[in-house]
Amino acid sequence: MRDRQRNGISVTGISGLDLARQTWDSMVADRVFGHAAELGFYFLFSLFPTLFCAGSILGLAARSAHQISDKLLEYLALVLPTAALGTVLNTFNETTAAASSGKLTFGSIAAIWSASIGISAIQDTLNVVFKLNDRRSYVVARVKAILITIVLTILVGAGLSAMFAGDFLAALADHALGDSLFATALAIAIRITAWTASGCIIALSFAVVYYWAPDWKERHWRWLTPGTMIGIAGWLLASFGLRVYLHFFNNYTMTYGSLGAVIILLTWFYISGLMLLLGAEIDKAIDDSIAEVQ
């Protein structure tokens, strides 16, 4: 892949209109919307084993620290549709209440294996997007998927920890400095720093997926690309838009009954997969444009 970069950010000369047109044509040709549905299913399949593992850990460690688990669930609620949050929380609470050492071991293995199935699907779809023939054997591809899963798990944990640490330090500053303008300013600065760090970790997660998941002949690490930025922004906006839509026009329960929450959750995962593939398509369109110029 040939590209021009400055300070880790791709620099391109393609116009926004041409980029949008090329990206759309490529998305249609690559059947991105169908692949996003496939990713959505695998993401849903991976969610509850992952919650089982998280619930087992918190069930052992957070019985005397319920505020920690509550805070982490609040962060999840920022992007997850409210109508589906109850189903997720119920599953989380059930696994936390039934946690034990044996279940912790089994849950961790099951979570990594199940989540790696989703990463395997990402490997296949990104190979389609970037027009790559996967030369890896099943075993090699699956081992890489498991390793990527572990890395992403660590990054997600780091992102959540950054947000939690920001809130904790901000509250500590308020308590130590009292009700003053300086304390308020310091608390705001701490939270902005923490959320910025969390955003950088999300961008790093995209970079890891784009770098390691496809079977590149030549790998070129890029910290931040237009596709990454648009993918993350699109994911946040789409998640917020879905929440707003469901707040005013939630017909899923009437249509699907008790399965409505699951359908909403699957829709959110579909959007998440679509934004991941959209970012890849944008980067591919930019790379093709640069290759033509060169």
Image (spheres, rainbow, N blue to C red):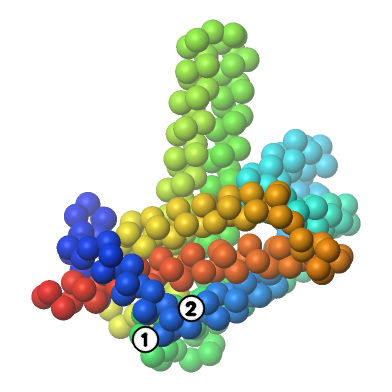
Percent from the top left, x then y, of residue 273?
54, 69
Q: At label 2, which amino acid type do we have?
A: Val
Give the distance between the C-alpha atoms of the residues marked 1 and 2, in whole angstroms. 15 Å
Image point (38%, 74%), residue name: 24
The residue at which mark 1 appears reads as 132
Q: Say few, some or many: other residues with alpha carbon within 10 Å of mark 1 (under 14 / 14 to 19 / 20 or more).
A: some
Q: Say few, some or many: other residues with alpha carbon within 10 Å of mark 2 (under 14 / 14 to 19 / 20 or more).
A: many
Percent from the top left, x then y, of residue 70?
74, 41
The residue at which mark 2 appears reads as 32
Q: Quadrant of residue 30?
A: bottom left
Percent from the top left, x then y, of residue 19?
29, 68
Q: Quadrant of residue 47?
A: bottom right
Pick the front one: 56 or 244: 244
Image point (42%, 89%), residue name: 134
Q: At label 1, which amino acid type do we have?
A: Leu
Q: Can you tell which mark lies on residue 281?
A: none
